[in-house]
Amino acid sequence: MPIKKFLTMREHQIFELLIANYDTEEIATKLNISSKTVRNHISNVIQKLGVKGRSQAILELIKMKEIKL
């Protein structure tokens, strides 16, 4: 039985780019979406995790093995 992932595919793409040191504008350009959409995805993940910011979200996602450094 497949393991249910916490992140959507797009959220995963965005957080992989964040840990690769891309900023919001660069992520938006790379994924061909608006910077507002990037910020919305990040906010959704922060809310899902119940943390206070991007850095905490990244740490939690690493602990959960959703993303890797």
Image (cartoon, rainbow, N blue to C red):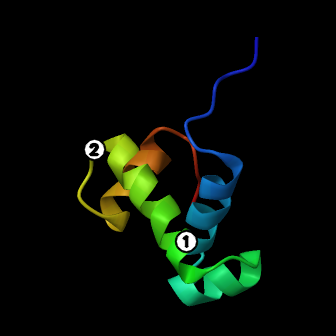
Inspect this view and state whether residue 65 appears. Answer: yes
50 is higher (above) or lower (below) than 58: above
Residue at image coords 35%, 43%: 49
Mark 2 vs mark 1, foreground winner is 1
Q: Indicate the position of residue 14 as horizontal and vertical percent values.
A: 61, 65
Residue at image coords 75%, 19%: 2
Instruction: Please give the residue where the numbered disc 2 appears in the rendered image.
Output: 50
Residue that protrudes farthest toward the left in the picture? 52
Where residue 43 sits, quadrant-wise, is bottom left
59 is higher (above) or lower (below) than 8: below
Disc number at residue 6? none
Element assignment for label 2? loop
* Quadrant location of the N terminus in the rendered image: top right
**Label 2 sits on what residue type?**
Gly
Element assignment for label 1? helix
Instruction: Please give the residue where the numbered disc 1 appears in the rendered image.
Output: 38
**Label 1 sits on what residue type?**
Val
Q: Is residue 43 left or right of residue 10?
A: left
Q: Indicate the position of residue 38 as horizontal and vertical percent values.
A: 55, 71
| C-alpha separation, residue under disc 2 versus residue under disc 1 | 18 Å
